[in-house]
């Protein structure tokens, strides 16, 4: 391992900013929002993207190092510590209205990045331990069904009309939120039932239902520690984390659809069906999620070995700035639609 690889430690700036926002309060209350949607976009505007790849031999060596896996695992205690601290603060009832509202977005961004995003990486791993770590990360975000639908739904149907997590051209993100969240949840139940029946398990052993049970225990903890009034604030923070994830889904495949062949099947997934970003700061903070085309090419490939693919279309901005632009549909369409049209012509 080289000294340069320690740059992934910067991913922990997200929990640090989140915790600082909760501790300091006042002007600092937005915490991770400052980092993710102010500092990072500003830096990425002036720092050019780096599309280069490490040599294959270096990639193979990186894949064997426990350092990269441990960075993911450490998100579990960090997540539960900050969630516990947040619930304790809610129970004290000392936050101002401004601080409470800011905490919803602060903790929500943290849950989306260190919860769902890291769970996404671990949920693709083959080892049972990694998958259990993914489940633990999804419970506080109240999105425990995500890995089930993502792995066995999205990755099979991505860039087709059958995939609720693939944004259509000219589809406003607010309509996409409804379709992706609701239909993705319904698909997770169907996938869970198919897997349960294949394993000859009783109805209560649907993985979605088991996840709901774990989430209920967590919410019971919130009520016990902070009272019934605080549960609405916590659920709102979790919902912000879910919307952050769905916003990422929106920009990753916007307008990119696979062609249907004469056989009725869709053409194979290629690097041209995912929007990529090579802005290094975003790559670090999101554990290389932004190199999304290679992830779809080989979903079990570890984050530290994901490659830039020449055929993958590149977002004009990094992920954080793209997410902000997507929230204003007319601006997003004006920027992205010409790029989608150009790809379709090619």
Image: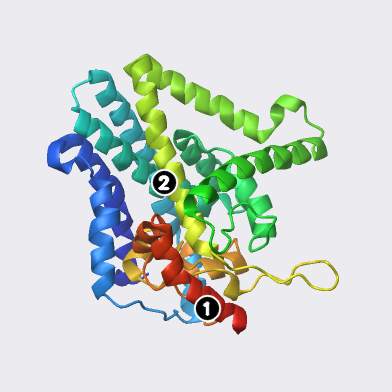
Residue at position x 48%, y 48% from top?
Answer: 174
Task: Determine the image quadrant of residue 38.
Answer: bottom left
How far from the left and from the top, in percent, is residue 15?
A: 30, 46
Please give left or right for residue 232 compared with residue 160 in the image. left
How far from the left and from the top, in percent, is residue 232?
A: 39, 25
* Of the pair 301 and 160, the residue shown nearer to us: 160
Residue at position x 49%, y 39% from top?
Answer: 138
| Res. 78 in view | yes
Q: Earlier in the sequence, mark 1 or mark 2?
A: 2
Please give left or right for residue 48 compared with residue 70 in the image. left
Task: Residue at the far right: name it.
Answer: 263
* Of the pair 320 and 82, the residue shown nearer to us: 320
Local SS, label 1: loop
Q: Is residue 238 above or below residue 63?
A: above
Instruction: Tell me if mark 2 has few (under 14), some (14-19) or many (20+) residues whose alpha carbon lies within 10 angstroms of its own.
Output: many
Image quadrant containing the C terminus? bottom right
Task: Residue at the far front: name it.
Answer: 330
Query: Which numbered tag is attached to residue 309?
Result: 1
Residue at position x 53%, y 49% from top?
Answer: 175
Task: Determine the image quadrant of residue 52.
Answer: bottom left
| Res. 73 in view | no
Q: CA distance from mark 1 to mark 2?
A: 26 Å
In this figure, which colouring scheme has been used for the structure? rainbow
Please give left or right for residue 11 compared with residue 63 in the image. left
* Of the pair 104 and 338, the residue shown nearer to us: 338
Identify the residue position indicated by label 2 in the image: 112
Query: Which numbered tag is attached to residue 108?
Result: none
Image quadrant containing the N terminus? bottom left
Q: Is residue 128 above or below residue 320?
A: above
How far from the left and from the top, in percent, is residue 126?
A: 62, 53
Instruction: Tell me if mark 1 has few (under 14), some (14-19) or many (20+) residues whose alpha carbon lies within 10 angstroms of its own.
Output: many
Local SS, label 2: helix
């Amino acid at each position: 391992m080289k000294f340069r690889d320690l740059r992934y430690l910067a991913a922990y700036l997200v929990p640090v900013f989140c915790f600082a926002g909760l501790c300091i309060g006042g002007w600092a209350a937005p915490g991770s929002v400052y980092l993710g949607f102010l500092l990072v976009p500003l830096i990425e505007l002036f720092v050019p993207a780096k599309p280069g790849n490490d040599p294959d031999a270096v990639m193979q060596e990186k894949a064997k190092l426990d350092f990269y896996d441990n960075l993911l695992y450490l998100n579990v205690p960090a997540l539960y510590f900050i969630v516990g601290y947040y619930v304790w603060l809610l129970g004290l009832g000392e936050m101002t209205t401004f601080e409470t509202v800011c905490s919803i977005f602060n903790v929500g961004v943290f849950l989306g990045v260190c919860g769902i995003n890291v769970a996404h990486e671990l949920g693709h791993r083959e080892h049972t331990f990694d998958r259990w770590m993914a489940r633990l990360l999804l419970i506080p975000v109240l999105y425990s069904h995500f890995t089930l639908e993502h792995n066995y739904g999205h990755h099979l149907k991505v860039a087709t009309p059958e995939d609720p997590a693939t944004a259509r051209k000219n589809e406003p993100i607010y309509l996409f939120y409804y379709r992706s969240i609701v239909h993705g949840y319904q698909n997770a139940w169907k996938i869970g039932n198919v897997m349960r029946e294949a394993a000859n398990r009783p109805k209560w052993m649907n993985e979605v239902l088991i996840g709901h049970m774990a989430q209920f225990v967590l919410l019971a903890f919130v009520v016990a520690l902070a009272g019934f009034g605080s549960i609405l604030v916590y659920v709102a923070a979790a919902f912000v984390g879910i919307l952050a994830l769905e916003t990422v889904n929106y920009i990753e495949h916007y307008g990119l659809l696979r062609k249907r062949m004469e056989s009725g099947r869709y053409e194979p997934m290629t690097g041209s069906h995912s929007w990529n970003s090579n802005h290094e700061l975003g790559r670090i903070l999101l554990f290389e999620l932004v190199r999304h085309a290679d992830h779809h090419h080989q979903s079990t490939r570890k984050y530290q070995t994901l490659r830039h693919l020449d055929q993958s279309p590149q977002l004009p901005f990094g992920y954080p700035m793209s997410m902000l632009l997507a929230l204003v549909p007319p601006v997003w369409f004006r920027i992205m639609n010409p790029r989608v049209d150009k790809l379709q012509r090619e």
